[in-house]
Image (tube, rainbow, N blue to C red):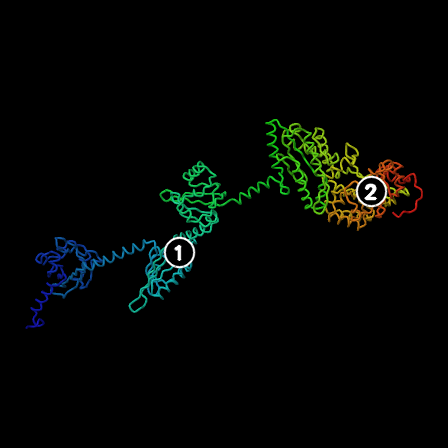
C-alpha cells in the first residue's frame, strides 16, 4: 500500500477527510478573510451550507463580526502571522454561532477559538480558525459559580459567624458576622494568622487568644470541638458564642483546614441564668409564692408557702387559693379584689387567712396577672408574707406611743384623746367630770439622791396605789417625772371628788420600802371640774395644774380645787420665776447676816447668811415668797453659788478690817445635791479669797440626810474632810432616823423654832427641846436654838445647857454695814448669864 508520506494526493485527501470529520469547527480563510475551507462541524453547528460559505468573507456570513474584536484578530493573523486563543466565557459571545437542538430549539454556543496563521502562499498569508464547543464546560463553571455565590450569600447573611482557616491557621474566608465581631475588613484578613491580626488590632487580642486555644484543641483531638467562647463587644459587654470547630485533614494526615461556626448565645445564656436565678429566688424567697394557671388553679408553690401555711404542694396543687380563706372577709371583699386584678393587673393589701391547722394569721398579699403576647392572661402570681410579728410590733409601738413605758399608764397623748372624748360625752349628756393633777412631794430629791432605780420603783408603787382608788372607767395617767393626771368620769360633785382626793393622799402616805429604803411619800393634788373650771381640755389641764401648785404651796400633802384667784397666783408665780432669772444678772440679791451667840458667855460665835431679794418695784421680798420658786425651777443652784462667792468676799473684807473672826453659815437646798461640783466650787471660793474651809458652815435639812445615797455621802465626806462644818438645820421636823447623826459627818444641830417657841409654856415642846439638847451633848455635837425671842426661852436654854442661840433676842438679820455698827457698839446676848462650870459640850 502506498504510503501517504510519498503520495501528496493521498495526504491531502486524508487531511481533508480528517478536517471534515473533526469534532471542532475548522475554517480556513485567505488574507481577504474569504472562506476557503468550511468543514462539516460548521455546517452542522452553524446551520450554514458549505456552498453558502465558501468564497465569502466571514463578516458577510456573520454580520455581527463587523467591527468586532474577533475580526481585528483575524486580520492580524493574515497580516502579521500572530496566533490568538480566545474564549467566549471571557469575551461573552465572540460571534453568534447557534447550536441546533432537538425539538427545534436553538442555543447560543459558547466557544473557544484558536486563530492560527498558515503557510504563506503566492497570494499571501492564510489563516485558520479552530472553534471548540465549550458550552458544557461553561455550564459547569457557571453552575459552580452560581452555587458558590448562593453559598457565599447564604453564609454572609447568616447571623452566626463562619470562618475558614487553612492548615497553618491562616484566615481564608470570613463571613460578614465574623468580620464584624473580629473587627476586620473585607479581604484584609486573608493569609493572616490570629497573632498577626491581634498585633494589628490589640483590642481584639483577648478574643483571638480564646479562639486560638480552642483551635488547638480541635487540631490535637482531630475531632469536632464544641465550646462556649466569651467575647467582649466594643461597648464592653461580654458576649457568649457557642462555637463548633471542625478540622479537615489531607489523606496523609496533614492539616488541610479548619471550619469554625459560632452562634451568639448571649441572650440565651442570660435567659438561662435569669431562669436559674428565678428558680433560686422562688425556692429561697422568704415570701410565700403561689403560681396558678389562667383558671386560677394552683400549679406551683415554694417552700416558704409550706412553712407559712402548713400545706404541702401535694395538698394544694390543682386546688384554688380559696382553700386558704379564713372567713374573715365577705364575698364583696373578694369580688372587689378580683375586679382590681382583672382591670389593673395587680392588687395588694392586708388579708387574714387560715393555716392548715386552722389558726388564722394576718398577711400582706400581692397578686399579679401575667399576660401572654396575645394579651390574654396565662397565669396569676401571688406573693404574701406572715405579718403577725409586724402587727404585734405595730401594736407595741402604738401602745408605747400612748403609754408611759415605766408604769404602763396612759401618757399625755392618750390622756389628751380621752379627755377630749370625755368632754364631748359630758357636753352631749349634761354630765360632769373632773381632771385631777397629782405631784409627789420632794420626789426629785429622792430620785436624784437615792438613784433612778429607787425612784422608778417608787413610781410603780404609787401607780398601783392610784389604780386601787379609782373606778375602771376612770383614767390614771403619768405625764412624766412624778406628775400624774386622773380623769374622773360622771362625777356627782366636788364632795365626791374631795373624798377621792383624801383617800388617795391617805394611800400615798403609807410608808414605802424600795431598794432597801423606807420612804414616806406624800402628794399635792389640784382639781378642775367640768364645766365649772373649764370647758375644753387646755383650760381644764391648766387649771388643775394651777390648783395643784396652790395645794403644794399650802403645805403639801393636801388638795385644792381650782378657783379664779389661783389663776392670779399662778401668773404671779410665773412672773416671779421670770424675774428670778434676771435677778442675778441685775445684781438684785443681797445678803443679811444674823448673829449666833454663846448662851453661856453671850458673845457672838457665828453668823448665818440669809438671802434677800431687792426686787425693783417690790422692795425686799421675803425668802418664803421666792425660795420655793427658785427650788422648783432649779435657779437655786446658781443663786447658792452667788451666795457662796459673796459670803467669802464679805468675810475677806471683814478679816482685812480686823473684824468678824467667826464662821458664816450658808443654807444648802437639797436641789444643790442634784448636781456634781459643790465640793469643787466651795474649795475654789475659799482659796480665791484666802480663807480656810473652817470659815464656812453649811446648813442642810434632814431631807438631804434621809436620801442617804453614795453621791450625797461622798460630797458630805469630802466637805467635812476639807474642814467645812456641816450643820443639820430645822432638826426634828423631818423623817430621818437618829442613826443618821451617827452616820453623817455633822458637827452641830439647829433646833427648829417650832420647838423653841413654847418651851416655857408647853411641857411637850420643853421635853422635845431638852431631849435634842441632851442627845447632841451625848454625841458631842454642838446645838443652836433658833427663834429665841424671850428671856424665858433663854433661861430654859441655859438651864438645859444649850450651846448657842439665834433669834431676835440677840439681833434680827442685818445688812453687813449695820451688823458692823452693832458689833462696834458691843453686840452681846443680854442679860448676861451667871458663871457656869465648863460643860465640855
Q: Residue at x 42, y 45 (%)?
A: 381
Q: Quadrant of residue 214?
A: bottom left
Is residue 765 at all visible to an observer of this figure? yes
Q: Residues within 10 Å of mark 1 (few under 14, many from 20)?
A: many
Q: CA distance from mark 2 to mark 1?
A: 99 Å
Label 2 residue SS: strand
Mark 2 or mark 1, earlier in chain: 1
Check contact, mark 2 vs mark 1: CB within 8 A: no
| Number of the label disc, if any, that sits on residue 217 | none
Q: Residue at x 90, y 47 (%)?
A: 839
Q: Quadrant of residue 597?
A: top right
Above or below — where is 624 with respect to 107? above
Q: Which percent across, then down, holds residue 529? A: 66, 30
Q: Is residue 228 left or right of residue 448?
A: left
Q: Considering only vertical position in the picture, is 669 above or below 174?
A: above
**Depth check, front residue: 285 or 106:** 285
Residue to which mark 2 is pinned: 750
Q: Is residue 65 visible?
A: no
Q: From the viewer's side, name the closer residue of 405 and 315.
A: 315
Give residue 47's position: percent from left, percent from top.
11, 56
Q: Residue furthest top?
A: 430
- Which mark identifies residue 240? 1
* Element type at mark 1: strand
Amino acid at each position: 500500500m502506498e504510503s501517504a508520506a510519498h503520495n501528496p494526493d493521498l495526504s491531502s485527501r486524508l487531511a481533508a477527510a480528517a478536517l471534515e470529520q473533526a469534532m471542532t469547527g475548522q475554517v480556513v480563510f485567505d488574507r481577504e478573510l474569504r472562506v476557503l475551507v468550511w468543514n462539516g462541524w460548521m455546517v452542522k453547528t452553524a446551520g450554514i451550507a458549505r456552498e453558502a460559505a465558501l468564497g465569502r468573507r466571514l463578516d458577510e456570513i456573520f454580520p455581527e463580526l463587523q467591527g468586532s474584536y474577533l475580526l481585528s484578530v483575524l486580520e492580524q493573523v493574515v497580516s502579521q502571522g500572530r496566533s490568538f486563543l480566545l474564549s467566549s466565557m471571557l469575551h461573552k459571545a465572540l460571534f453568534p454561532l447557534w447550536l441546533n437542538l432537538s425539538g427545534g430549539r436553538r442555543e447560543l454556543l459558547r466557544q473557544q477559538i484558536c486563530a492560527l496563521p498558515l503557510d504563506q502562499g503566492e497570494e499571501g498569508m492564510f489563516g485558520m480558525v479552530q472553534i471548540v464547543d465549550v458550552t458544557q464546560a461553561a455550564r459547569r463553571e457557571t453552575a459552580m459559580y452560581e452555587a458558590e455565590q448562593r453559598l457565599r450569600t447564604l453564609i454572609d447573611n447568616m447571623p452566626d459567624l463562619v470562618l475558614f482557616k487553612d492548615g497553618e491557621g491562616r484566615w481564608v474566608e470570613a463571613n460578614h458576622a465574623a468580620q464584624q465581631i473580629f473587627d476586620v475588613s473585607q479581604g484584609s484578613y486573608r493569609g493572616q494568622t490570629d497573632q498577626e491580626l491581634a498585633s494589628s488590632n490589640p483590642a481584639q487580642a483577648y478574643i483571638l487568644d480564646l479562639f486560638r486555644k480552642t483551635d488547638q484543641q480541635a487540631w490535637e483531638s482531630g475531632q469536632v470541638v464544641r465550646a462556649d467562647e466569651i467575647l467582649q463587644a466594643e461597648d464592653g459587654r461580654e458576649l457568649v458564642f457557642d462555637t463548633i470547630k471542625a478540622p479537615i485533614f489531607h489523606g496523609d494526615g496533614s492539616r488541610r483546614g479548619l471550619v469554625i461556626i459560632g452562634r451568639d448565645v448571649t441572650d440565651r445564656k442570660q435567659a438561662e441564668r435569669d431562669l436559674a436565678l428565678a428558680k433560686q429566688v422562688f425556692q429561697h424567697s422568704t415570701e410565700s409564692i403561689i403560681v396558678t394557671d389562667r383558671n386560677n388553679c394552683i400549679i406551683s408553690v415554694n417552700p416558704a408557702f409550706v412553712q407559712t401555711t402548713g400545706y404541702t404542694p401535694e395538698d394544694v396543687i390543682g386546688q384554688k387559693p380559696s382553700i386558704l380563706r379564713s372567713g374573715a372577709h365577705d364575698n364583696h371583699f373578694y369580688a372587689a379584689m378580683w375586679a382590681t386584678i382583672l382591670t389593673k393587673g395587680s392588687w395588694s393589701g392586708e388579708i387574714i387567712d387560715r393555716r392548715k391547722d386552722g389558726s388564722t394569721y394576718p398577711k400582706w398579699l400581692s397578686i399579679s396577672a401575667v399576660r401572654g403576647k396575645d394579651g390574654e392572661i396565662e397565669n396569676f402570681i401571688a406573693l404574701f408574707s406572715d405579718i403577725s410579728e409586724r402587727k404585734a410590733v405595730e401594736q407595741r409601738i402604738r401602745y408605747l406611743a400612748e403609754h408611759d413605758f415605766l408604769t404602763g399608764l396612759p401618757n399625755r397623748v392618750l390622756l389628751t384623746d380621752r379627755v377630749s372624748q370625755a368632754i364631748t360625752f359630758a357636753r352631749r349628756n349634761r354630765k360632769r367630770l373632773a381632771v385631777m393633777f397629782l405631784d409627789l412631794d420632794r420626789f426629785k430629791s429622792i430620785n436624784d439622791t437615792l438613784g433612778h432605780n429607787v425612784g422608778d420603783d417608787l413610781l410603780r408603787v404609787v401607780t398601783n396605789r392610784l389604780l386601787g382608788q379609782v373606778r375602771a372607767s376612770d383614767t390614771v395617767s403619768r405625764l412624766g417625772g412624778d406628775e400624774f393626771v386622773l380623769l374622773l368620769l360622771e362625777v356627782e360633785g366636788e364632795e365626791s371628788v374631795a373624798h377621792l382626793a383624801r383617800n388617795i393622799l391617805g394611800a400615798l402616805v403609807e410608808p414605802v420600802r424600795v431598794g432597801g429604803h423606807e420612804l414616806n411619800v406624800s402628794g399635792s393634788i389640784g382639781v378642775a371640774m367640768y364645766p365649772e373650771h373649764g370647758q375644753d381640755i387646755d383650760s381644764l389641764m391648766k387649771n388643775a395644774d394651777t390648783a395643784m401648785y396652790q395645794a403644794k404651796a399650802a403645805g403639801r400633802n393636801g388638795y385644792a380645787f381650782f378657783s379664779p384667784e389661783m389663776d392670779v397666783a399662778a401668773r404671779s408665780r410665773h412672773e416671779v420665776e421670770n424675774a428670778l432669772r434676771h435677778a442675778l444678772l441685775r445684781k438684785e440679791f443681797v445678803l443679811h447676816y444674823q448673829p449666833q451667840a454663846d448662851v453661856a458667855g453671850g458673845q457672838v460665835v457665828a453668823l448665818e447668811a440669809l438671802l434677800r431679794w431687792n426686787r425693783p418695784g417690790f422692795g425686799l421680798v421675803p425668802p418664803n415668797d421666792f425660795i420655793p420658786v427658785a427650788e422648783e425651777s432649779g435657779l437655786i443652784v446658781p443663786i447658792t453659788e452667788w451666795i457662796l462667792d459673796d459670803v467669802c468676799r464679805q468675810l475677806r473684807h471683814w478679816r482685812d478690817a480686823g473684824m468678824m473672826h467667826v464662821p458664816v453659815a450658808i443654807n444648802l437646798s437639797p436641789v444643790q445635791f442634784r448636781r456634781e461640783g459643790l465640793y469643787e466650787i466651795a474649795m475654789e471660793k475659799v482659796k480665791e479669797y484666802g480663807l480656810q474651809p473652817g470659815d464656812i458652815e453649811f446648813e442642810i435639812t434632814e431631807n438631804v440626810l434621809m436620801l442617804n445615797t453614795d453621791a450625797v455621802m461622798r460630797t458630805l465626806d469630802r466637805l467635812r474632810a476639807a474642814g467645812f462644818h456641816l450643820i443639820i438645820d430645822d432638826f426634828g421636823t423631818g423623817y430621818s432616823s437618829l442613826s443618821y447623826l451617827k452616820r453623817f459627818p455633822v458637827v452641830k444641830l439647829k433646833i427648829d423654832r417650832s420647838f423653841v417657841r413654847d418651851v416655857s409654856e408647853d411641857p411637850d415642846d420643853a421635853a422635845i427641846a431638852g431631849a435634842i439638847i441632851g442627845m447632841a451633848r451625848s454625841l458631842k455635837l454642838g446645838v443652836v436654838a433658833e427663834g429665841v425671842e424671850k428671856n424665858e426661852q433663854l433661861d430654859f436654854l441655859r438651864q438645859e445647857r444649850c450651846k448657842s442661840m439665834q433669834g431676835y433676842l440677840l439681833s434680827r438679820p442685818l445688812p453687813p454695814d449695820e451688823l458692823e455698827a452693832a458689833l462696834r457698839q458691843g453686840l452681846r446676848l443680854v442679860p448676861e448669864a451667871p458663871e457656869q462650870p465648863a460643860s465640855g459640850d
